[in-house]
Amino acid sequence: MNTLFATRRFFLTAAVGMTCLVLKAADEAKDGWVSLFNGKDLTGWKAPDPNPFWKVVDGVLVGENNPEKKGSMLYTAESYGDFELEADAKWQGEIDSGFMVRKPELQLQFGVSRSLKKDMTGSFYVGKYPEEAQAKDAAKLLKAGDWNTFKLQAKGDTFTVWINGTQASQYTNAKYAGPGPIGLQIHGGLAMKIEFRNVRIRPLPAAK
């Protein structure tokens, strides 16, 4: 009797969990959000070959250097122009990562800049870190060693970033206008690991 009850309870819990996932997906679709990571594999992404860098562990997308500390990029198969991108990211220690968007490529920095030797999380990198594009209060917004939610809006010539719901930086530059894939970075030259989950995007109407 106890075994039968436990079995029924297991299937009921599983059914409730699946229902929640379906409802969440329906809500996202209704609001225009599209998941970029299915929590199972790298479907929808162009992984390097061979690929010792990117893997899925317990529903989390993990990026990590190989033993030679070589870097890597992971790009979406599709390109995007105007959009809102949202993801949770987590790391510990000194890393150098970020989101890559548009063409020519614009980077939203996560972690320590190799050139400046300081944490520039939430700032935009365009071969340098323009003063007006820096997230100077990011340290106050970040939860060290824990999951942090990043939202990046690219609309026309303006790029805006929120960290855990608070606007952290904004950068305007008409040069970065072409649609491009969304990229995730592992910087070479250091041992680093970064994790992503709940990666999703909402395409926006082109700015006039």
Image (cartoon, rainbow, N blue to C red):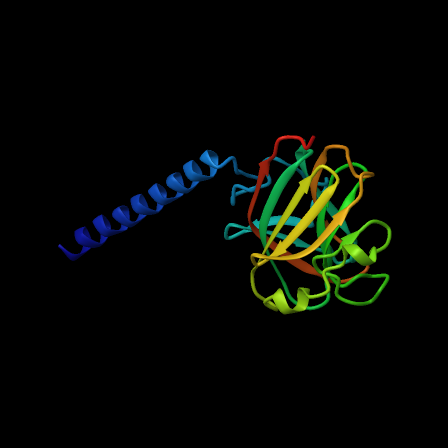
Q: Quadrant of residue 100?
A: top right
Q: Which residue occupies 62% across, 54% down?
A: 162
* Any part of residue 187 in sight: no
Q: Is residue 173 left or right of residue 99?
A: right
Instruction: Return the residue nearer the eye: 69 or 135.
Output: 135
Furthest-front residue in this view: 208
Find residue 39 and report its horizontal and vertical position in percent.
52, 45
Residue 182: which quarter of the image? Answer: top right
Residue 28, how many percent across, how many down?
47, 39
> With respect to residue 118, does 83 lie above or below?
above
- The answer to which quarter of the image holds residue 22 is top left
Picture coordinates of residue 12, whole percent (x, y): 25, 47
Q: Nearer the viewer, residue 175 or 119?
A: 175
Q: Is residue 7 toward the left or the right of residue 140 in the image?
A: left
Residue at left offset 13%, top offset 54%: 1
Is residue 9 among what the camera can see? yes
Q: How many marks?
A: 0
Please give left or right for residue 60 compared with residue 169 in the image.
left
Across and down, in percent, residue 203 comes to 60, 34
In which quadrant of the rendered image does the C terminus lie?
Answer: top right
Q: Is residue 38 above or below residue 77?
A: below
Asked if 114 appears above or below 79 in the picture, the reply is below
**Residue at (79, 41) in percent of width and height:** 105
